[in-house]
Image: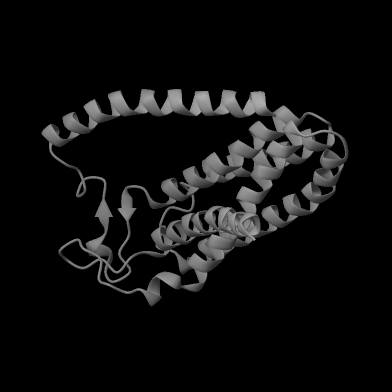
Amino acid sequence: FLSRLLDVLIFLGSLIPAWAIGVVAGNVLVGFPVDKSGYPVPDIFGYFNPFALFSGCVSIIVFVLHGLMWLNLKLSGEALAHIRKSLGFVWALAAAFLLAAALWGAAGVTRAGGTVQAIPGLVVVVLGLVGTLVFFRGGKAGLGFVSRKLTIVGAVAAAALSLFPVVIPSKLDPANNITIASSAVTDSSLTVMLIIALIGVPLVAVYVILLYRTFRKAA
């Protein structure tokens, strides 16, 4: 019983964050109810709007495809054959959901005002998806995994570019948008954050490297 319970908890602990990332991203594109003071008005049910919920589903599928590409890189034998049977279907599903999200966003449901600005990111998404499928079918798992990463980078870049220079759009009034300039902090705060980053980022990098090397040996 305990083993099954832990399996369920691990599954939920992976599923919920993957879904939540997409929901938050969808809300950023749709806009938050930011008032004149620059603070969001509480609107719990408003955060679960259709576009945000769909973005959560897109996020799950993208992460599933990413995980399958990683397994395709690491596994062998019967397990690899099983993964490869699922990968093509999940790739098609991810491509369809990403296309639907892009078209839905371009239709005006979001507060993103720079559709043309997002083109470079969208191009990277397309190249990443095509590269993932081509390299997967060509038996080049490593390049396929790298192409999969490009899809994620491109999607994030497209969203950021479409909003620029807005950081958090307001769906109450565009005048309430939080922009790069309005959200900038003082030089002293930036200095403190730089010091923290210079200390923290190398530590995180060392941790990730050690973790990867440990699991690679275990595999």
In front: 9, or 39? Answer: 9
151 lies above or below 9: above
203 lies above or below 134: above
| Residue at the front extreme, as displayed | 1
Residue at the location (79% across, 36% down)?
Answer: 136
Q: Position of residue 63 (x, y in %)?
A: 61, 49
43 lies above or below 93: below
Q: Position of residue 17 (x, y in %)?
A: 49, 55
**In-image side of 48 versus 12 (left or right):** left
In front: 19, or 213? Answer: 213
Work out which quarter of the rendered image holds the N terminus and state it.
bottom right
Residue at the location (48% across, 53% down)?
Answer: 115
- Count up the numbered dots: 0
Residue at the location (68% across, 34% down)?
Answer: 145
Work out which quarter of the rendered image holds the C terminus and state it.
top right
10 lies above or below 51: above
Q: Position of residue 59 (x, y in %)?
A: 56, 55
Q: Position of residue 190 (x, y in %)?
A: 19, 33
